[in-house]
Image (spheres, rainbow, N blue to C red):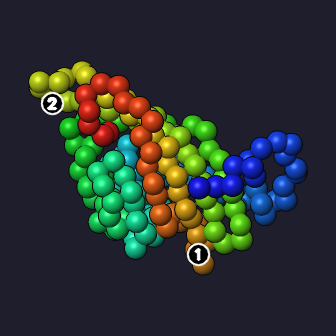
Amino acid sequence: MPDLGAVRGPVAAQTASMLADQDAVCKLACIYALGMDLRDEDMVRSVFDPDGVIHGLMGAERAGDYVGRLIAGTRPYRATMHTIGNQHAVIEGDRATVWSDCIALGYDQRPERDGEVTEIVVRYEDEAARTELGWWITARHTVKLWTRGPERAP
């Protein structure tokens, strides 16, 4: 859990380096969302340490194994839209904690549910680490805030 006191005002000006790190760690959730909507497994995998652990809506597993199940879970949907909203990042050296709120919509293509839309609102609570190549997610806890429509994760 991030030190929420660190994300309160007043806000001091940040250096260019601090802004670059904040931008990088926040982009991880956005790249993940785009990869999910494109069904691009390689893109989704690229934001995770393969040995990191995802605690998601389908249980907990190594990221390297969990991502394939995530992509497979989108198959019943003609289209999905993962929208990343509020983000809060706390960066301490080469480690970061990032909270990203996400609204995930799924347009169901199965004949018995054609046209139904599932809305799932979650908060991604990510731990990230700086590597030689940049930042990636080392652990994710997905917290479901609410669901509307058929119970199925887009």
- Mark 2 is surrounded, within 10 Å at the Cα level, by few (under 14), some (14 to 19) or many (20 or more) other residues, namely few
Q: Position of residue 22 (x, y in %)?
A: 69, 56
- In the picture as drawn, the residue positioned furthest to the left comes out as 112
The image quarter containing residue 146 is top left
Image quadrant of residue 52?
Answer: bottom left
Seen in the picture, residue 116 relative to 11 is either above or below; the reply is above
Q: Is residue 148 above or below residue 152?
A: above
The residue where tag 2 is placed is: 110
Residue 133 versus residue 107 in the image, above or below: below
State which tag comes first along the sequence, 1 or 2: 2
Q: Tag 1, which secondary structure?
A: loop
In the figure, is residue 67 to the left or right of 141?
left
- The residue depicted at 78 percent of the width and 63 percent of the height is 17
Residue 131, which numbered label?
Answer: 1
Three-letter code for the amino acid on which mark 2 is drawn: Arg
Residue under the point 11% across and 24% down: 112
Under mark 1, the amino acid is Thr
Left or right of 99, for residue 106: left
The C terminus is located in which quarter?
top left
In the rendering, which numbered label is found on residue 88? Answer: none
Quadrant into which the N terminus falls? bottom right
Q: What distance separates the C-alpha of mark 1 from that of mark 2?
A: 42 Å
Badge 1 crowding class, 10 Å Cα cut-off, few under 14, some 14 to 19, many 20 or more, is: few
